Image: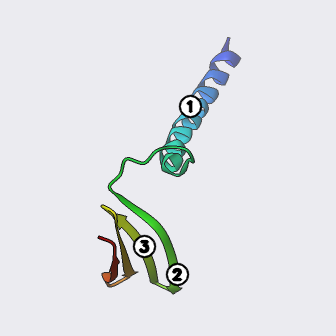
Amino acid sequence: MWSYILKLAIMLPLVCGLMIGCLLLWRKFETRMPGKPTTRLIAVKETMMISPGVKLAVIEFEGRRLLVSVARSGVTLVDRVGA
């Protein structure tokens, strides 16, 4: 009887921890799964690292594409393309 209770006391938190971990990973990677239609208004199309701490990003919003520079100091609009 005591061996059963000891196994239960060890396995129950382990299984619950694995379930919570799986749910958190699912939530994190859910947006990256292929075949899922996006319903967001803003989409990051591509990013490119220019130098350490500075990144260029192409953002699509309502048919327009925006090229922005993302650095530690903030975000700066570089160029606009689209109607």
Tell me the quadrant of the picture where the N terminus can be found.
top right
User: Label 3, on which residue?
Assistant: 58
User: Label 1, on which residue?
Assistant: 13
* Residue type at numbered disc 3: Val
* Callout 1 crowding tier (Cα within 10 Å): few <14, some 14–19, many ≥20: few
* Callout 3 crowding tier (Cα within 10 Å): few <14, some 14–19, many ≥20: some
Label 3 vs label 2: CA separation?
12 Å
Under circle 1, the secondary element is helix
Along the horizontal axis of the image, is 35 left or right of 72?
A: right
Q: Position of residue 6 (x, y in %)?
A: 65, 23
Along the horizontal axis of the image, is 5 left or right of 76?
A: right
User: Label 2, on which residue?
Assistant: 49
Q: Position of residue 40 (x, y in %)?
A: 35, 52
As drawn, 64 above or below 25: below
Q: Position of residue 32 (x, y in %)?
A: 53, 52
Q: Nearer the viewer, mark 3 or mark 2?
A: 3
* Callout 2 crowding tier (Cα within 10 Å): few <14, some 14–19, many ≥20: few
Under circle 3, the secondary element is strand
Label 2 vs label 1: CA separation?
42 Å
